[in-house]
Amino acid sequence: MKKTTFLLLAASALVWGACSFSAGTKKDLITGLSYTYNGFGVDQVALVGPDNAPLRNNEVQLSTQIAIVVEGLTNYALKDDKAFPGLMLNVTNKEGIAVISEADLFANSEGYAASDASILRGTITVGTPMNAGETYHVKMRVWDKIKPENELTAEVDIDVK
């Protein structure tokens, strides 16, 4: 009986170990950027400023650009050796009204090499209708169009100065 249980546990471990499944949640305590991922592997997600350097807080200047950058995104399901990412980007004001609403920035894509799809960025121009002195909520969602359960969601509140 013990031998059967051991073999069953060993076989289960091998099956689970063979799956390339990844999930997690992380939060950058400096900027407040948080992200969750399921199915994808990911090295890093960061809020960057116009110089492409990670921000040191969540304060952004009006008339500049910021971006949420995802690096090292892996585990796409490939079709014809191409990855098909989706990227949703929303920015809402404190009332929850969208000032930017993009359902899929890669809607018309014909696919990318997996290495090219490993780095994705959602860029936001901080300008009209945004106003200085207000806080906005940014949400970016990345998913695999071939295997939609592979998903990464990043969120942050930005204070416009």
Image (cartoon, rainbow, N blue to C red):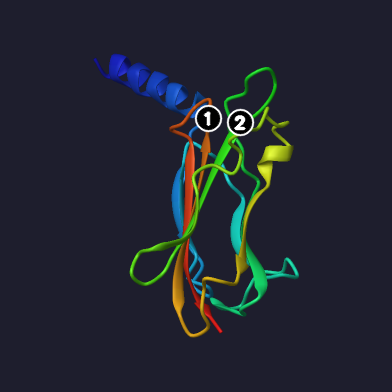
Q: Is residue 30 above or below residue 116?
A: below
Q: Residue at x 50, y 65 (%)?
A: 33
Q: Residues within 10 Å of mark 2 (few under 14, many from 20)?
A: many
Task: Please tell me which residue is depicted at 32% across the width and 16% down the height of the picture.
Answer: 3
Q: Which residue is mark 1?
A: 145
Foreground residue among 1 and 139: 139
Q: Amino acid at mark 2?
A: Phe
Res. 60 image quadrant: bottom right
Residue 56 vertical position relative to residue 23 in the rendered view, above or below: below
Inspect this view and state whether residue 22 appears. no
The reply to whether discs 1 and 2 touch (Cβ–Cβ < 8 Å) is: yes
**Residue 104: assigned label:** none
Horizontal side of 140 relative to 110 (left or right) equals left
Q: x, y percentage for residue 45?
A: 58, 57
Disc ID at residue 84: 2
Residue 4 shown left or right of residue 120 in the figure? left
Residue 142 in picture, x, y percent from top left: 53, 44
* 150 vs 81: above or below: below
Q: Residue 160 location, x and y as percent?
A: 53, 79
In this rendering, the count of numbered labels is: 2
Q: Residues within 10 Å of mark 1 (few under 14, many from 20)?
A: some
In this orientation, does residue 10 appear? yes
| Foreground pick, 87 / 39 | 87
Residue at screen point 45% across, 76% down = 135
